[in-house]
């Protein structure tokens, strides 16, 4: 089994389609989604549709949660808030119900998936350092867990009580180590690289690969402007921030 693991699509249809095509070209047999299907970019309904068609395991992100409500209950910054209001207006009632009903975490085969953290998944904390990772590891009962939310691809490893953080293209999964792996973001990377990020987990070979894929950035930017979303959202895509 080869899993394509996607996170933080954020309504970027061009990036999502490029990643799905790439994953199929690399013989992925299964898909997994780590949430934040919507928010920021211009194709929330289409992205919900594509992900639903995959019929894959998925967890809820904070933007999914906010888009499913009638009014925001969280303190998003003004740009994210404008985007989430626009997103609500551009989703069907069925899309919103589907988003509302997503679970916060789940197990797939022998690994776990969550959007933000395992210690308090409903509070949407960010895991950037070893201390944040330690809190999550305390609640991780599988060898491997994939997460998103930071939009920065990163691997945390815990071995003999010691936590290490690395950015690596290939992660070889060893039995006595725990892995908390951020796949990066499909639709709005924030590590200075504009290309869409995702992971492939080769289950039989115990190997995780982190990939970057080019997509039609200009088309995605034009749609943001045409939709009347904040232009900043188009600008940031080009610089990966
Ligand atoms: Zn996100």
Image (cartoon, helix red, strand yellow):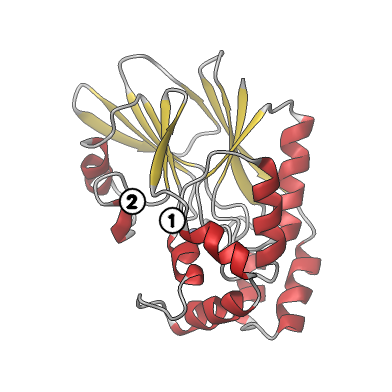
Q: Is residue 8 above or below residue 43?
A: above
Give the residue drawn at x 57%, y 76%. 88
| Residue nearest the viewer, comparing 135 with 88 | 88
Q: Is residue 25 above or below residue 48?
A: above
Q: Position of residue 188 (x, y in %)?
A: 59, 61
**Are dots 2 and 1 in contact, CB under 8 Å?**
yes
Horizontal side of 23 relative to 3 (left or right) equals right
Q: Position of residue 140 (x, y in %)?
A: 28, 33
Q: Is residue 235 above or below residue 176?
A: below
Estimate how packed mark 1 is, as few (under 14), some (14 to 19) or many (20 or more) residues with alpha carbons within 10 Å.
many
- The circle on residue 127 is 2
- Is the residue indicated by label 2 positioned so its CB lies within 8 Å of ligand 1? no
Q: Where is residue 139 in the image (x, y as percent from the top left)?
A: 24, 37
Give the residue drawn at x 80%, y 59%. 216
Of the two numbered discs 2 and 1 on the same chain, state the one appearing first in sequence.
Answer: 2
- The circle on residue 150 is 1
Residue 231 placement: quadrant: bottom right
Quarter containing the N terminus = top right
Horizontal side of 148 relative to 234 (left or right) equals left
Estimate how packed mark 2 is, as few (under 14), some (14 to 19) or many (20 or more) residues with alpha carbons within 10 Å.
many
């Amino acid at each position: 089994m080869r899993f394509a693991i996607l996170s933080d699509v954020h309504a970027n249809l061009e990036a999502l389609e490029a990643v799905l095509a790439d994953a199929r070209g690399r013989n992925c047999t299964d898909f997994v989604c780590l949430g934040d299907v919507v928010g920021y970019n211009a194709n929330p309904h289409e992205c919900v549709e594509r992900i639903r068609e995959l019929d894959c395991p998925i967890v809820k992100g904070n933007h999914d949660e906010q888009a499913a409500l009638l009014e925001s209950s969280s303190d998003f910054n003004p740009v994210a808030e404008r985007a989430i209001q626009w997103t609500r207006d551009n989703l069907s009632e069925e899309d919103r119900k589907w988003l509302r009903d997503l679970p916060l975490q789940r197990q797939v085969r022998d690994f776990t998936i969550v959007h933000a953290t395992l210690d308090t998944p409903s509070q949407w904390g960010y895991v950037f350092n070893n201390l944040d990772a330690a809190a999550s590891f305390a609640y991780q009962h599988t060898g491997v867990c994939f997460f998103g939310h930071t939009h920065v691809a990163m691997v945390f490893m815990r071995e003999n009580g010691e936590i290490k953080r690395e950015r690596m293209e290939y992660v070889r999964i060893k039995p006595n180590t725990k892995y908390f792996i951020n796949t990066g973001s499909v639709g709005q990377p924030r590590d200075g690289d504009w290309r869409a990020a995702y992971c492939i987990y080769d289950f039989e070979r115990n190997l995780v690969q982190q990939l970057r894929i080019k997509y039609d950035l200009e088309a995605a930017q034009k749609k943001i402007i045409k939709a009347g979303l904040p232009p900043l959202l188009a600008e940031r895509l080009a610089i990966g921030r």
